[in-house]
Amino acid sequence: MSIGKAKRGFSLPCVIFGNMEIEYSSHFQRAYQSLDVQIRKKAEKRESVFRKNPFGAVLKTHKLQGKLREFYSFSIDNKFRIVFKLVDRSKAVFLDVGDHDMYR
């Protein structure tokens, strides 16, 4: 595959590099405050990566399915995730944070 061309049937919503602006929903803020301190520290490190490239391999960013199909999620660690919505190429809204139970 050459640069600038996607495989058939696969495309990223946009290519973003730089400084992503993040807005935090009130629900996200409450859920974040309820996390263990160690998880919050990990989340802060992942947010730093996200700001530079929301689709960086370490984040394992993926589009959600079903009722949440308009949103994306990335990994904080093996258990915890952040759910977000892309507003445009330079802005995202963090909607929720937690383990897989938040998808239910």
Image (tube, grey):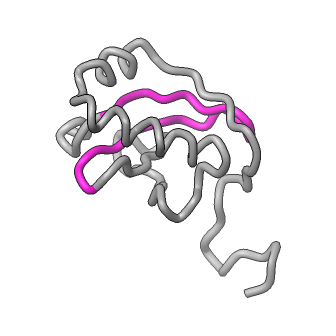
Which segment did they paint magenta?
78-97
State the image quarter where residue 35 is shown: top left
Q: Residue at x 74, y 51 (%)?
A: 17
Please tell me which residue is depicted at 47% across the width and 55% down the height of the picture.
Answer: 59
Point out the image quarter for the C terminus: top left
x and y percentages locating residue 19 in the rendered image = 73, 38
Quadrant in the picture for residue 60: bottom left
In this rendered view, identify the residue nearer to me: 27 or 66.
Answer: 27
Please tell me which residue is depicted at 65% across the width and 66% down the height of the picture.
Answer: 11
Query: Is residue 81 shown above or below 8?
Result: above
Query: Where residue 57 appears, x then y in whole percent?
Result: 53, 64
User: Magenta segment, principal secondary structure?
Assistant: strand
Looking at the image, the residue that sits furthest to the bottom is: 1
Q: Compare residues 47 and 15 and report the one nearer the observer.
A: 47
Residue 28 drawn in magenta: no
Q: Is residue 72 left or right of residue 31?
A: right
